[in-house]
Amino acid sequence: MTPVQLYVLAGVLLCGLGFAGFLLTSHLLRKLMAFNIMGSGTFLLLVGLAQPNNTPDPVPQALVLTGIVVALAATALALVLMRRWYHLSGRTDLQGGPGD
Amino acid sequence: MLALLIPGLLFTPLALAVLCLLVNFRIGRLFSWVGIIVQVLVALGLWATVADQGGLYYDLGGWAAPLGIELRVDGLAVTFVLLTAVVASAAALHAGAYLDPRKGYQSYFWPLLWFLWAGLNGVWLAGDLFNLYVGLELISLAAVGLVALGGEAPALRAALRYLYAALLGSLGYLLAVALVYGSYGTLSLSGIAELAADHPPAPLILVLAALGLALKTALFPLHFWLPAAHGIAKSPVSALLSALVVKASFYIMARLWLEMGEQAGSIWLAQGLGALGAAGVVVGSWQAFRQSRLKMVVAYSSVAQIGYLFLLFPLSWGVATTTAELAQQGITLHLISHALAKAAMFLAAGNLILAVGNPQVSALAGVSRFLPFSLFSFGLAAVSLMGLPPSGGFVAKWLLLQASLAAGQWWWIGVLLLGSLLSALYVFRIFRASFLETGSDDPFYHPPRSLEVIPMALAVMAIGLGFVANLPLTVMALPVGGGVP
Amino acid sequence: MSFASALPLLTLMTSLVAALVIFMLPEQRQGLRTLLNLTAAVVKLGLVAIMVAGVFRGEDYSISYTLLPGVEFILRADALSVMFAGLSAVLWLFTTIYAVGYLEGAPNRSRFFGFFSLCVASTMGIALAGNLFTFLLFYEMLTLSTYPLVVHRGTRKAVRAGNSYLAYTLTGGVVLLLGVAWLHTLFGDLPFAATGHFQQVDPALHGTLALIFLILITGLAVKSAIFPLHGWLPTAMVAPAPVSALLHAVAVVKAGAFGIVRVVYDIYGIEFAYALGVLEPLGWLAAFTILYGSVRALSQTDLKRRLAFSTVSQVSYIVLGVTLFGPIGTIGGLVHLLHQGVMKITLFFCAGNYAETLGVHRIDELDGAGRRMPLTSIAFTLGAFGMMGAPPLAGFVTKWMLGSGALASGMLWVIPVLVASTLLNAAYFLPILYRLWFATPKGWSQERRWGRLETHSWLLWPPLLTAALTVLLGILASAPFSPLSWAELVAAREYLP
C-alpha cells in the first residue's frame, strides 16, 4: 500500500465515522465532535490526494491551514450557541424544549 | 480605478465588521451608514466599468494564483455585487430603525452584517473553488449569528439547526474540492473547464458538491432547517437570509455545473435535481398556504421559489446552446427578482406584524383600510413572486417557459404554470385576511415612514426589473478579458 | 419620439399616473380626487379622439421597446384598437361620474379610485397592445387591478367572490401564457397584423396551430365568460355597482372578447382560421352560451344576477359574429363589442340606482319603481329593449348584421339561435319592465331622498346619457365614425383581397 492510498483510506474512514456520528447522535456536543472528525478526514484527503510524486505540495497545506481556522471559528460559534441554549432550555439536544 | 474598487468591496466590509464590534448599537449604525454609501458607490462604479469594458481577472494584492487570490470580475459577478449592495443596504437601513438599541446583544447586528456582506462579495467574485469555500463559511457563520440575534430559546434552536446543516453542507463541498485538487492539481474555475475537456472528472465530485450545496440552498427535501430559521429571525435578517444567503450556495453550484457539468453530469443528475426543485415548488407552496403565522408563510414561500432555481440543471444539460442560454438568463433574472421581492416581502411583513402586534395571518383584518402602504408594498412584491406581469418574476418565468419549450422538456412547463397558481394560493390568502373590514376604528400602531418606504423601494425595483431586464442580461453576456496590468 | 408615436403611450399614462397620484392622496381629499379623475378621463377621451381621426386618415401610431432579447413591448393604434379604446374612454368618463356619486361618504375611496384607474389603464393597454406579449401583460394586470374592486366591500361574501374570481381568471391567465409562449417559441414575436401571419405556414404545423388556438381561446374564454368558464361572473356581482358596470361593459369580459377578436383576425387571420376548421366549433360553443346564459337569466330573482347571466349570453354574440366567416358577420360581432357595452352599462347604472335609492336588489321588490324613479326607469327600459334587439335601438343593428352575416356565409343554424335568444331576452326583460311600470308600489323600507331629483344627480346623469347613446347608435348607425361604419372599415382590412 502506497502512502497516498493510506492517507486516502484513513481520510475516507474518518469522514465516514464522523458522518455516521453526526447523523446518529443527538447530543449537541457529540454532534460537534463528529463534525470535527469529519473535518479532519477531509483535510487528510486534501493533503493526501495531492502528492502524486511524494513531493509535498504547498497549496493544500495552505488550504488546510485556512480550513482549520474556519473549523475552529465554527466550533467556537457552535459552543457559544449551545451553552446559551442549555441555559435557556436545560437541554443538550434540539428535540422538545420551549416553543417546539 | 479598479485597483481601488475591488479591494474596496472586500476590505471595507471586513474593516467595518471589526470596527462595529468595538462600539454600541447607535455608533455602529452611524459607521454602517457611511459603509453603505461606500459599498453602493463602489458596486455601481464596478458595474459601470464592467458594463463598459467587459469582464476581467484580477489578482488580489498582486499575488498570482495558486497561492494568491484570483478574482473573476465578470458581468454576472458584478450584477450580483450590485444586487447585494441594494438588498443589504435596504435591510441595514430598515434594521437601524427596526431593532431595539436598548437590547445589548442587538448591537452584534452590525459586525455580523458586515461579515456577511464581505462573504457575499467574496463568493460572487471568487475565481477558484477554495476561496468560494472560505466565502461560503464566512456567510454561514455570520448568518447563524444573525438568526440567534433574537436571543430567545426558539431562535437559538433554529440557529443551531441551521448551523449544523450549514456545517455538514460545507464539508460535502470541501470534499469535492479535495477531489478536484487531487485529480487536476488546480482549483481555478476556468482551469478546471479546460482540463475537464480532456480528462472527464469523476461524477462523484459533482454529486458530493451538489449534495453539500443543496443542503445549504435548502433544496427539497433538505429544506428542513430553513423555515424555522427564516421565520424566527428578525425581519431585516430574514430578508438578508432569503434574498442573498441561500443564493450564494446556489451560485457556486451553478458555476461548477456550467464549468464541468457537461462532462461530469448525467441526465439522471440533471433531471433529478430539476425534479427535486419541482417538488420543492409544490411542497413549499402548499406548506406556505397552511401556515398560520405571516412570516412562516413568507419563509415557506422561499422553499418554493428556491425550487425554480434548480430547473437550471435539466434545462442546460444536453440541449442546444441557445436553449441553455435562455435557461441561464431566466434563472439569473429569477434569482435577482426573487431577491428583491422576497426582501421587500419580509420587510413589509415585519412592518405589518409591528403594526398589528400579532404574528398571525388572521390578525390582519382591517389592514387594507388603515395600513394600505405596507400592504401595497407586500402586494407589489407578491406580484413579482407569483410571476405575474409586469415584473421581474414574470420575465424570468417567460424565459424559463421558452427554455422548456425549446428543450422539449414539457414537464417543467407544468411545474412553472402550476407554481404560479400555487403561489397565488398562499399570497391571496394574506390579502383575503387583510381586506376584511373590522369597523371604522383604527386599532393599529403606525410604523414610522422610514420603515415603510424601504420595502416599497425594493418592491418597485422587483416590478421595474420587468421593464429593464434586457440591461442585466446584456452585461451578463459580456466576455471576460485578460487581467489588469 | 414624436408626439404622434407617443400618443398611445400618453393615452395609457393618463390613467396610470392618475392611479398613482390617487393612491398617494389622503382619504379625505375628495374634491381633489374627483377633479383628478375627471380631468384624466377627459384628457384620455381627447387623446383617443385624436387617434381615431388619425387612424381614419390612414396614420399609424406606434411605439416599441425591446423588453427581452426577441421580445418587444409594442403599443400601437390601429383601426381595431382605437375602436376598443374609444369605448373604454367614453364609458370610463360616465362610470367615474357615477362612481363618485355612488361612493359618497363610503370608506376606502382612495384605494377604490386608485385601482379603478389602474383597471382602466390595463384596459387601454389591452386595446393598444401591438403584439400578443404586450396583450398578455395587460391582460394579467387587469386581473390584479380588478381583484381589490371585487372585494371592495370587505364582507365575507365579497372575499369569497374574490376567491372565485381569482381562481377562474388566474387559471385562465396561466393557460393563455402557455399558448402565447408556445407560439413565441415556434414563430418568434408576433405583432398584430391585419389578415394574420399563417397564410404560408408549413402544413405539418397545422395540427399544432389548432391545438395552440384551443389553448389561447380557453385562456381568453374565462374572462369573456363563455360556457363552461363563466362561473365567476354572477358571483362577482357582490361588487359595488360601478365595478359591475365596468366589469361587464368595458373591462374584463370585453378584454376576453377583444382578445378572441385579435387572435382570430390578427394572429391566425380569419381566412386561415376558417381553413383550419377551428371557427365552426367555437361558433357552436358561442351559440350554446347565448342560449344557456339566457335560460339561466330567466330563473334569477336578483336583478344584478339576472343582468350578469344576460352578459354571459350577450358577450357570446361578439364571439359568434367573429366565427361567421364573411365580412358581414365580422361587422356584426365587432359592432356588438361597442353596442353591448353601452346598453349593458345603462342597465347596471340603473340597477345601482334602484339599490342605492330604494334599497332594492330583488326583481320582485321593483313593483311600481317606474313611478317613483321615472327617468332611471326610462333609461332601463331603453337598455332592455336595446338588448332584446328592438328597432331602431343599437341592439337591433347588431342582430340584423349577425343574421345577414349568417345568411351570407350559409351558416343557417345561426338564425334559429338568434330568434330563440331574442325570445328569451324578451322573456326575462319584459317581466321586469312590467313590474316597473304597471305593478302597484308596495313601498320601500330603505328609501332615501335627495332633494327634488329622484336620486343623486351624479347617479342620474350617466344612465340617461348612455340610454340616449343607445338610441343614437341605432338611429345614426350609418353616420361616419359610428361604430357600424368603423366596424365596416375594420372588416374591409381583415379579409384578403
Image (tube, rainbow, N blue to C red):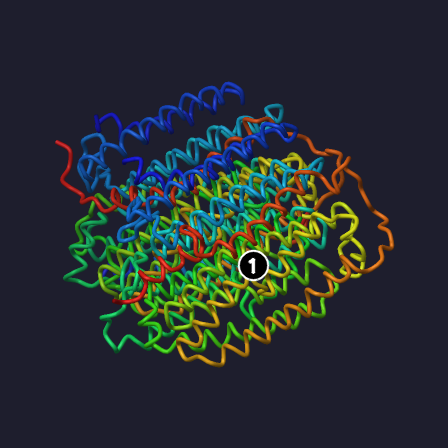
Q: What is the quadrant of residue B482 in the picture?
A: top left
**Quadrant that contains the N terminus of chain B:** top left
Q: Chain of mark 1?
A: C
Q: Position of residue C254 (x, y in %)?
A: 50, 57
Mark 1 neighbour density, 10 Å: few (under 14) some (14–19) many (20 or more) = many
Q: Is residue B213 visible?
A: no
Q: What is the quadrant of residue B149 in the picture?
A: top right
Of residues B7 and C117, the one nearer the viewer is C117
The local secondary structure at tag 1 comes to: loop
Q: Is residue B372 visible?
A: yes
Q: Horizontally, is C316 left or right of C453 in the view?
A: left
Q: Residue, x 72% and y 33% (percent of image)?
A: B442
Q: Position of residue C151 (x, y in %)?
A: 64, 50
Q: Position of residue A20 (x, y in %)?
A: 47, 61
Q: Residue, x 35% and y 59% (percent of image)?
A: B208
**Quadrant that contains the C terminus of chain B:** top left
Q: Residue, x 53% and y 68% (percent of image)?
A: C226
Please say if C311 is above or below C156: below
| Residue hosting label 1 | C393
Please say if B254 is above or below B269: above
Of residues C92 and B213, the one nearer the viewer is C92
Q: Position of residue C85 (x, y in %)?
A: 44, 48
Of residues B238 and C381, the one nearer the viewer is C381
- Total numbered circles: 1
Q: Amino acid at mark 1?
A: Leu
Please say if C105 is above or below C60: above
